[in-house]
Image: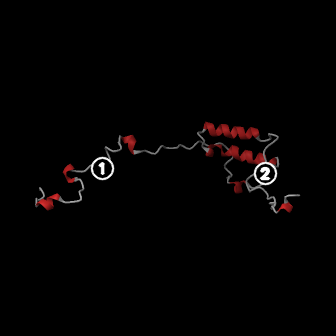
């Protein structure tokens, strides 16, 4: 007996999601892909300096029918993404520890230590009739 007659449903196939495309089995665009990865490594993974290679890679895939032909504007590219750009400088955010701040020591500093009291359940001074020292 077949699965259809056993009460199981067979799911109909659906086309791939937009943006997913066939693998490059004949290595037609592998050279551009390797060049893009090398560019990323050289520029500390800053994709803005390697966008021109990404655009060339997408054009190669469209030329070899590995993906549907789309305008580059719909893929997120601009007209001036045709030449390499300088990598962006990632400035490290300054933190308190760079200035010498130490956890636990520099946190809360009361003005006078005698203003700090240990909490108690019973106020013994009121019970004994003592006055607060000034």
Where residue 79 sits in the image (x, y, percent)?
Answer: 69, 52
* Local secondary structure at mark 2: loop
Q: Quadrant of residue 121?
A: bottom left
Q: Residue at x 84, y 58 (%)?
A: 3
Relative side of 66 to 130, left or right: right
Binning the other alpha carbons within 10 Å of mark 2 as few (below 14), some (14 to 19) or many (20 upward) gives some
- In front: mark 1 or mark 2? 1
Relative side of 133 to 100, left or right: left
Q: Which label was assigned to residue 108?
A: 1
* Local secondary structure at mark 1: loop
Looking at the rendered image, the quarter that the N terminus falls into is bottom right
Distance of mark 1 from mark 2, alpha carbons? Answer: 61 Å
Q: Residue at x 71, y 57 (%)?
A: 74
Where residue 123 sits in the image (x, y, percent)?
Answer: 19, 60
Q: Which label was assigned to residue 67?
A: 2
Q: Residue at x 30, y 49 (%)?
A: 108
Relative side of 132 to 66, left or right: left
Where residue 62 sits in the image (x, y, percent)?
Answer: 79, 49
């Amino acid at each position: 007996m077949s699965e259809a007659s056993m009460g199981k449903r067979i799911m109909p196939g659906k086309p791939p999601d937009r943006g997913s495309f066939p693998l490059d089995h004949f290595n037609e665009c592998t050279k551009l892909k390797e060049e893009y990865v090398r560019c990323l490594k050289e520029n500390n993974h800053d994709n803005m300096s390697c966008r021109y290679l990404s655009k060339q890679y997408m054009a190669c895939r469209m030329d070899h029918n590995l993906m549907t032909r789309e305008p580059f504007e719909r893929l997120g590219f601009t007209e001036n993404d045709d030449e390499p750009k300088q990598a962006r400088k990632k400035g490290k955010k300054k933190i308190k520890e760079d200035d010498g701040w130490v956890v636990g020591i520099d946190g809360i500093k009361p003005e006078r230590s005698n203003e700090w009291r240990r909490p108690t359940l019973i106020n013994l001074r009121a019970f004994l009739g003592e006055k607060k020292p000034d």
